[in-house]
Amino acid sequence: MIDLSLLSDGGMPWLDASGRASHLVLSTRVRLARNLRGRIFGLRNSPKEREAILTEVLAATRDTPQLAEAMLIRLDQLDRNDRELLHERHLVSRELVGLEGGGDVRAGAGLLVQNRVGVMLNEEDHLRIQGLHSGLALEAAYAEVDALDSELGQRLAFAFHPQFGYLTSCPTNVGTGLRASVLIHLPGLVLTKEITKVLQGLSQVGLTFRGLYGEGSEVVGNFFQLSNQTTLAKSEVDLLDHLGKMVRQIVEYEEQARHILLRDAPAIIEDKIWRAYGLLRHARSLPVEEAMNLLSGARLGVGLGLIPDVTMYALNKLLVYAQPAHIAALDAGGPALSRSDINIKRASYIRQALTSGHDKTP
């Protein structure tokens, strides 16, 4: 089993709820797609070519300050549960770890991680340079990723066109190659039935939304991942500024919705919150989707100051540690668990986490 304790904060410093507006915004991710000049792009290259790309990139990172002490994880050498663990921690995409289609992992698929930055290797593009921060922190996340991109660009020749910019496997990434996203909790807008209007407005201004785990994931627990749709013909600063303005506006809408709920239906909202928290504290079996919805209710209660002695940090951790692969990992080495067994263990784990110290990493 992979030892994720070797990573700083288990590879999840973004969980600590320290960033701006972290009662609503769980995390900010900035990612740059890059390909090596003269190499066949990821959708058509061979296993031998991918191994050569991996070797070339690793050689370049040895004297790169931001990755000099990075942990290399060879995803093509891990079993499925370990790969799912990395995905549940938001460190890798579904595609890179083979959670789509037939479940195959490309030869040479790898992940480099050091503190808040990392590089996915041999995904759709040769490199996906990424940074993940707590709260709303687009500028800080981009600054780290941009610095790493510059360091690697001094050692690697990236595929670049003077007219179109950085060349990528998917046309929507051509240009800056930048994809920025924020993971935000919007129960107020859902409960006031304003969420559809807000999401439709996003599509009209060049943004899009996905679920808790990005592309291909459904929205559960009122968690939405908001991001830019295209990267061509705009600068990185313009893309980040536009997304930041929209997110700050949505944060304001969510705050207004929560105020309306407390003003117009306080008993109903308090009952919903305390029912969610009560089930988390006492349920004996919890499917993952129900757990996410209940954690959403508890998170709303903490955000409104109604539930004492529970931190956002604790609830952020439970969003990850209550996922299927993490629950299954509690019994690593034992017999395979059925879905029913996992639901029972999930309920037990959440009860214990909410009863005894919340702020220690499990």
Image (tube, helix red, strand yellow):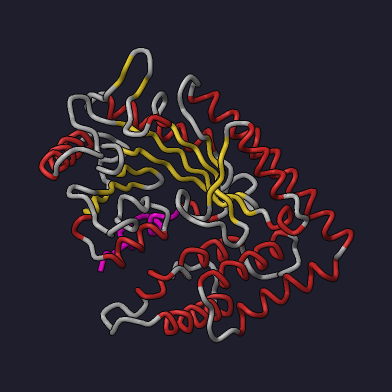
The quarter of the image holding the N terminus is bottom left
User: Compared to 359, does 105 lie above or below?
Assistant: above
Magenta residue check for 9 = yes
The quarter of the image holding the C terminus is bottom left
User: Which region of the structure is painted magenta?
Assistant: 1-12
Please give the name of the residue rendered at 73% of the width and 52% of the height, measured from the top-left corner: 189
Q: Name which quarter of the figure residue 331 lies in.
A: bottom left
323 sits left or right of 54 in the view: right
Magenta residue check for 226 = no
In terms of depth relative to the viewer, which is nearer, 266 or 67? 266
343 sits left or right of 161 in the view: right
351 sits left or right of 193 in the view: left
In terms of depth relative to the viewer, which is nearer, 264 or 215? 215
Where is residue 326 drawn, in percent x and y? 40, 70
Q: Residue furthest right?
A: 264
Where is residue 359 drawn, in percent x and y? 53, 67
User: Compared to 168, does 331 lie above or below?
Assistant: below
In terms of depth relative to the viewer, which is nearer, 250 or 2? 250
